[in-house]
Image (tube, grey):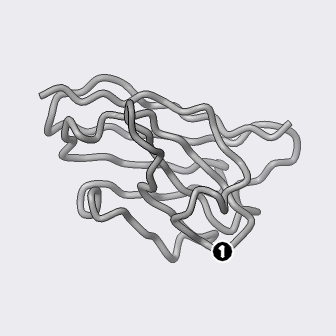
Amino acid sequence: QVQLVESGGGLVQAGGSLRLSCAASGRTFNIYAMNAMAWFRQAPGKEREFVAAISRTGGSTYYADSVKGRFTISRDNAKNTVYLQMSSLKPDDTAVYYCAGSGREISALDTTFQFWGQGTQVSVSS
């Protein structure tokens, strides 16, 4: 069974930083095989929203306007891992963060992603 496992969440003060990791587990699953990897988030009482996405080679990245300049998505295909470096965190960034993988072209639409992790909680205090 293919799984994406997120880690690195936690509680941080506003202005702080966190790095989330998304590792692939399961037989023969290779993140490099995914055309796109992405991070989404869902805050309490809100719909899931796009955060950032990265292409297969890492040559293309896309960000939600709300995180542009503060978050950086990257991938290490040799380690089968995708990262989300988050800086200058704000209380509005509080959410469960999900990693997702897609065999389709890079997109900000969650419906185009076939593989999902269970999520990791990020809480930012003011």
Q: Which of the 4 image quadrants contains residue 125?
A: top left
User: Mark 1: which secondary structure?
Assistant: loop
Tell me the quarter of the image containing the C terminus.
top left
How many numbered callouts?
1
Front-lying residue, 31 or 78: 31
Q: Position of residue 92 (x, y in %)?
A: 23, 40
Q: Which residue is under mark 1?
A: 105
Residue 18: quadrant of the picture = top left
* Residue at 46%, 39% in the rendered image: 97
Q: Is residue 64 above or below residue 44?
A: below
- Residue situated in front as seen by the camera: 69 or 110: 110
Tell me the quadrant of the picture where the N terminus can be found: top right
Which residue is at 30% across, 27% downward?
123
| In this picture, residue 123 sits left or right of residue 98 | left
Instruction: Please report the residue visible at 51 percent of the width from the left and 65 percent of the height from the top.
Output: 108
Q: Is residue 90 above or below residue 76?
A: above
Left or right, residue 37 beside residue 92: right
Left or right position of 40 against 3:
left
Crowdedness near tag 1: few (<14), some (14–19) or many (≥20) residues, C-alpha within 10 Å: some
Quarter residue 33 falls in? bottom right
Q: Nearer the viewer, residue 32 or 11?
A: 11
Q: Residue furthest front?
A: 45
Q: Measuring from the top left, give residue 47's x and y in whole percent.
A: 45, 44
Q: Position of residue 101 (x, y in %)?
A: 66, 55
18 sits left or right of 31 in the view: left
30 vs 97: above or below: below
Three-letter amino acid code at disc 1? Glu
